Each structure stands twice: as C-alpha cells, then as structure tokens.
Amino acid sequence: MHITHHGGHQGVTGSCHELHYAESKSVLIDCGMFQGQDARDHHEAQIDFPIDAIQALILTHVHIDHIGRIPYLIEAGFNKPIYCTKPTAKMLPIMLEDAVRLGITRNRRMIKELLDDLRRLIRPIPYGKWTDINSGRTSSELDDSESAKSHLQFRFQQAGHILGSAYVETHSGDERFVFSGDLGSRCTPLLRDPISPERADVLVLESTYGDKIHEGRETRLHRLESILCETMQNNGVTIIPAFSLGRTQELLYELNMIMESVGHKTQCTLLKRIDVIVDSPLAIKLTDIYEQLKEFWDDEAYEILSVDNQPLVFKNLVEIDRGGDHRETLNYLHKSGKPAIIIAGSGMCTGGRVVNYLKAFLGRESTDVLFVGYQGAGTPGRKIQESERGKGKVWLDHEEIEVKAKTYTISGYSAHADQSDLIKFVQGIATKPKEIRLVHGEQPAKQALGEKLQSLGYVVN
C-alpha cells in the first residue's frame, strides 16, 4: 500500500489522503476544505485529482477541514459509499448544508440534490468492527474465506476529538496503515479518550499542537471563571468565537458547572445574573444532536446525567436562532451596556455571526475576546489573537477594526491532542510503527513533534 496526499500534508487544513491498496484501487480518507493561509495557497476548491480508482470515502469526523470538499467530489462524479460512524452520519448533512449555503450556493434545489446524493451514499459503521471496503459488510457478517479474499478492510476507533470522531485502521494482506484524523485531548469532557491501536506499519499522525502542552482541566476552569467574573465587574462583553461542533458543547457543559458552583463564592455571586448567549443556528442544532446521542458520551458525563438530565442547558442560557433575533440581540447589547457572554461561530472568525459582534465590540476596552481553539494562519482570528491591545487592527467584512479589547487564549479547551497526548498515543502502540508520517500541522509544530518522536527511536517523515 502507499499514500498520495491531496491536502493536509504541507499545511493544517484540507485533510485528504488517498490510500492505494491494489492496482487501480484506492480509498480516500477525508476530503476537507482548505482554510486561512492554506486556502490562499490552493485557489481552487474543486477536485484536482482523478477519482476513477477511488472505491470509497472514509470520514474521520465532520469538521469542515475534513469534509468541506465533498460537494465538489460528488460534482466530479463520485458515486461510491461514504463510510463514517453513526454520530458522523447524523451530523454530516447538517454540516455540509450549512457550509454549502454559506460558501457555494444558496440555490435550494441544488442544495437539496446534493443532500439527497449524500444521504444515499452514507454508510454508518459501528466503532471497532472490521468492514470490507467492497461489500460494506462488517467482520461479524463475513466468514473467514470472504475476509481473506478482501482487498482492504478498515475499522473505526474512538478518537476523542468531537462527537463521532474516529481514527481509521486499515489493513490489506500483511500491511496495516492507521490514519489518526484529529485526536482529542485526554481531558476533554463528554467524550471517551482515544485508545492506541495494537499495531501500525505506517501511522499518519496529526500534529496541530505538536509543539504545545495544554493547560489542565482545573486550570482552564479557573481561568474561564476568572474571565467571566471580570466581565461581570466591568459590565463588559466576553466574545467566544467557537466551532459549532465540539467546542460549543464543551463550553456549555463546563459553564453549567461554573454556574452551579459560583453561588458558593461570594465575590462572584452576580455571575448568576449574566446571560450566556449562543448565537449560532448550527450550534443549536448540533447541541440537540449531542443530547440525542448520549450513548457516545464518557463516564463523567453519564454521572452528571444522573443528577442533571440536561447538562448542556441551564437557566442563564439564551439561544439565538433567527436572523432577526440576532440583530435585536446585537442592538440590545450595544445600547444596554449589560454584561454578557457570547458564543458564536465561526471559530476562526472568518465569517458568521461572530463577525458582527467583533465589529461592534472590539473597539471597547471592556470587551474580552476568548479563544478556545486553534486559529489558522492568515485568519482574522489569528490576527486578533496576536494583537497587542490598543495597537492591533483587523479586517472584518472589508472594514478595518481597531482592537482595544483584551484577548485571552485557553488552550485547555482545544479539541486537539497536545504534544504529550500525541506521544502517549504513539507509545501506546504495542508493535512499533515502521514509519510515522506527520500531517495537519504548521511547520514548527511538525518539527518539534518529529524531533521528540525521533529521540524516542521512531522513524518520522
């Protein structure tokens, strides 16, 4: 077997890896959109590689940098199975409908046709079941002779990144290749931790935070509470640009915990009167799906469920869906001067409703902007994140905005594994990989992780 990379190899976004397993036969692992600087380096989103040999598309999860080019793939004539986990199958049409409507077309007929094609191709597969790429049957349905004849089998394992995320094990003959997708931090609430595979001849490993160590959960909770208390004292606004899937749900889960405990801390009792606004129709839909798929939550979340049947909903929470309500909320906050916490997309501030809040409040010294996820090079989010208060400026909607707000980054909320988590994942593989190929990372992150792994005796490319 061998791999051709069609994205995510030299940069962070646009993950798309073609695994060739037989003559004129291959599978795609993800088909993501380029974002930020990566998008500037790849001007065309269309599929620029032949697809005749591709027998299936295997998805690790539904973030746009892993699924965003699927509409172009289908437009190019792809008509083969799309394998994914059950939660991913439920969320994939919602995520792509939103992405297509915002970035490609608002033509309802075209969107409907795409979604019809998508639903026809989706094949949900359970975690941990070896599946034949040609027949789509799982290991429990295959007899030994069929299994031996299979050109390629694969299975999904928990990745702990977002709901439904998986890393992908593949084997053909005596070879086993593993694609990490995006691995989650081991202190991520709601989700089960990833467990390393028993072997991988070749491991394709993400390296987003290959040069970083995240804050621990206790530290991040303390920092989040401190920022919210400051917002209350300043009658300011805290803006949290958050990805609609994963980060928003984790924030709601832990904000609920803070709201419950804060009454016991007299210096911050007023925090219970602050509004937590989720202004994202997509995030609201996905939070509902998180609630529906509790079977995939981790043990901690199950324990919380025993005393709180809605841990993602609390009395301070205000959900904004309609565009008219968004404009009313924006005007109200602009005039009232009352404190609020706003969670809105997009996570890298490249578009969406968060841009309107940033345009309205970045110029105020009482505003806090809290980043809880990776900000890609070249994105407005990265520019704001790196701004020195009172000196920085950022372009939003073709308008230059002065940054007077304070900016914070809490790395502990990242859905990505840090360097220590990535190394633990590698060291947990009983049969040492013959080769580790680093993808999905900026060059400094790749270099730092690569050097660390090489010092431990691994072959890294």
Image: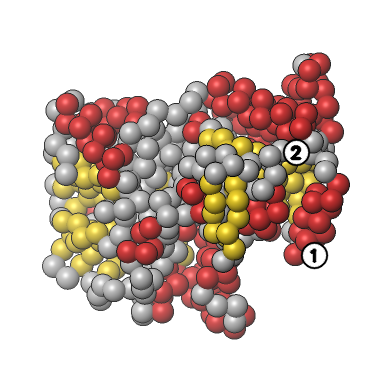
The N terminus - image quarter: bottom left
Q: Of label 2 and label 1, which has the lower sequence position?
A: 2
**Residue lying furthest front:** 391
Scheme by which the image is coloured: secondary structure
- In front: 414, or 404? 404
User: Which image quadrant is residue 91 in?
Assistant: bottom right
Within-10-Å neighbours for mark 2: few <14, some 14–19, many 20+:
many
Residue 297: x, y in percent? Answer: 57, 37
Q: Which residue is mark 2?
A: 236
User: Is there a contact, CB below 8 Å, between mark 2 and mark 1?
Assistant: no
Up-down: is 227 above or below 104?
Answer: above
Give whichever of 97, 318 is nearer the camera.
318
Q: Is residue 127 left or right of residue 252?
A: left
Instruction: Point out residue 377 in the picture as x, y percentages from the top left corner.
Output: 40, 51
Going 47% across and 58% down the picture, which residue do you hit?
64
Which residue in the structure is indicated by mark 1? Answer: 324
Above or below residue 167? Residue 261 is above
